[in-house]
Image (cartoon, helix red, strand yellow):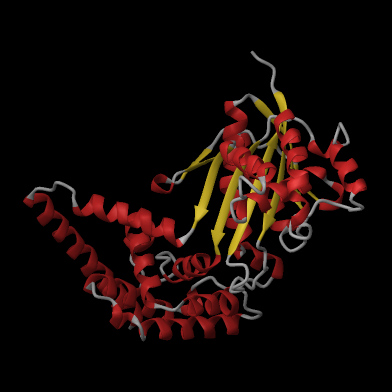
Amino acid sequence: MKEENEMFVFIDESGNTGQNIADKSKPIFYHLAILSKYNLDLDLKNRIGNFLQSHKQKELHATENPKMLEELSPIILQVLKENNVSFYYAEIEKSLLAYAKLYDTIFDNVENLGARWTAYQFRPLRLMLLCNLIGIIDENIAFDFYKNCLMANSQQQADEYLKRTCKLILAETYKLKDYRSKQIIEDAVNGAKYFSSDITMFEKCKQDRWRHLPHIVSFWPMLSAISIYSNKHNLKVHRIIHDEQEQIHRVISEMHEVAAKTGKTGTIWDLKENGALDFTKIPENSFEMKDSTKSYGIQITDVCLYVLTHDEPDSFFEPHKYELYNYINKHLIDRFIFSKKMLYFEASLWYNKIMNANLSQDQIEFGKDFVKKMDDKFYEDYQTIRR
């Protein structure tokens, strides 16, 4: 059996505004992971160290020194090529995160007796209903819910804002042109309003509230992509180094440990129509959060993330930065995009697939009868509980 080589992973982020995800100046949260054959922190040929010394800088930080990128880019590119580097990229649209968290809270059929199973557990319907919800309520309602309900300082505040949010949504459902969507959404919202005390929203521990931050959305898929890449190229993950983030240190570390323990059993999380997560190559105790000033690897990741997420470089005026930009794009192992554009695209695919399905009249009648029986049972149970 071929002996495994080691792999070092460096992770940096951009667009972090903490719990204030409504900040219009930073609407997107970004994650970038560099997967390197060698430890970039060592700076074996002292290229980064010499550059910093000649420019009297303590660390590479692209947002603070964007003018130096054209001069720095060929140095970074040479380091990437020599270390056989690949990349994983993620972007989280914060307004969609707020909407998704709102939907996840109100339409959870396990906790909300007014929510239907299909509206939460069946991905095509969930995506289509989320699109409809986004279409009728202003994003400020979702942002307000995120801030004052999910990040509430007390259970009372969380309950009050959930009920307030439900009232605001119900005031807008008249805009829905599809009667069935209106019915399903109103039932779930009314259920959340009447049984708000049964719905999990408030976390006593401040650290636990950070689980709602954008970082968490992309972290599981990132670990899965790292594991799959490791297996494909017969590379042993030696270290996963993340830029130090005090707010989420515990949560991210716990997620890594859960992934490592899951992977140790050889288990792959089968999420059905939501995909799968593979952690089989994520070792325990391999995760570390590190101050970027003490990690050349994180600093290089910072530069690459900046180049990737800002305007595409001009090939004539910025040829070195343009070359670096192209190299990063060509060596992406995967992308994770959590945006309204991607939501609408996937929802439309499901809608067209369902609407264009070649069903016989018997199948259509069977489906109608099945849905009616489910609805009758739903309302019977719902009314019994309300009484």
Question: What residue sits 30% from the left and 71% below the top?
Answer: 184
Farthest-out residue, left: 361
Q: Residue at x 72, y 37 (%)?
A: 77
Give residue 248's position: percent from left, percent from top.
Answer: 71, 60
Q: Quadrant of residue 155?
A: bottom right
Q: Is 243 situated above or below 260?
A: below
> Quarter of the image holding residue 103?
bottom left
Residue furthest front in the image: 316
Residue 120 position (above or below residue 269): below
Q: Residue at x 18, y 50 (%)?
A: 356
Q: Is residue 357 left or right of residue 95?
A: left
Which residue is more in the foreground, 292 or 75?
Answer: 75
> Residue 220 or 362: which is nearer the viewer?
220
- Judge from the rendering whether residue 183 lies leftward or rightward of residue 21; answer left or right: left
Compared to residue 200, the image places residue 127 above or below, namely above
Residue 278 in the image, given as x and y percentages of width and height: 55, 38
**How many labels were placed on the picture?**
0
Q: Position of residue 106 (x, y in %)?
A: 44, 71
Q: Nearer the viewer, residue 317 or 294?
A: 317
Where, quadrant-wise, is the N terminus in this rendering?
A: top right
As drawn, 327 above or below 370: above
Residue 307 rendering spot, x and y as whole percentages: 66, 50
Q: Is residue 113 visible?
A: no
For the C terminus, the image quarter is: bottom left
From this viewpoint, which residue is outermost toward the top?
Answer: 1
Does any portion of residue 206 appear in the rendered image?
yes
